[in-house]
Amino acid sequence: MTTFKVRPARRGDATPITALMTELGFTADAATVTWIVSHPEMELLVAADALDKAIGIVCLAHRPQIRLGGRVASIEELMVTQAWRRKGVGRELLKRAVERARVLGVKKLEVQSLTAIAPEALAFFSACGFLPADTAVFRLA
């Protein structure tokens, strides 16, 4: 049986998290990871194997919003290394982020996914209780 644990990220995790993201085709730098680890409105959790090697991450960003009269949050990163996919790692990371959002009293929680239109991402997030949002995202050109 494969075992893993989920824990808050530490400053020493910056290099392994950067390596994990690079393995998955994303660019990241250790300085930004360290910044996120110490940021008061960011929560970065690490899934680690039995040797404490990072095998997945989830990043929860939260902030106050005037319109909803409270705190809103988004899951901005959810990544699991290929070798650990379909073993419950992503589901556990997402569960922990949702639990933390509840503790914070978040009024709205959204997932931002670069692969939101991919069938496997849609199936995964739907199975975890998320529905596609009817909002549009605009990016400054």
Image (cartoon, rainbow, N blue to C red):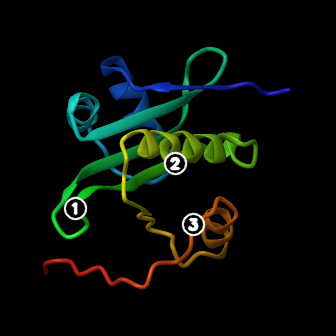
Q: Residue furthest front?
A: 69
**Number of the label disc, if any, that sits on residue 130:** 3
**Percent position of residue 126, x then y:** 65, 68
In the picture of the structure, the residue carrying the numbered disc 1 is 69
Q: Residue furthest top?
A: 51
In the figure, is residue 70 to the left or right of 87? left
Q: Quadrant of the C terminus?
A: bottom left
**Percent position of residue 127, x then y:** 70, 63
**Percent position of residue 75, x then y:** 41, 54
**Percent position of residue 103, x then y:** 43, 39
Badge 3 or badge 1: first in the primary sequence: 1
Q: Residues within 10 Å of mark 2 (few under 14, many from 20)?
A: many
Q: Residue at x 20, y 70 (%)?
A: 67
In the figure, is residue 141 to the left or right of 25? left
What distance separates the C-alpha of mark 3 from that of mark 2? 17 Å
Looking at the picture, tell me which residue is in the foreground, 57 or 28. Answer: 57
Q: State which quadrant residue 14 falls in.
A: top left
The answer to whether mark 2 and mark 1 are in CB contact below 8 A is: no
Q: Residue at x 69, y 40 (%)?
A: 84
Looking at the picture, tell me which residue is in the foreground, 125 or 54. Answer: 125
Number of marks in the rendered image: 3
Q: What amino acid does circle 3 point to?
A: Phe
Q: Residues within 10 Å of mark 1 (few under 14, many from 20)?
A: few
Can residue 135 be seen in this snapshot?
yes
Q: What amino acid does circle 1 point to?
A: Gly
**Number of the label disc, if any, that sits on residue 79:** 2
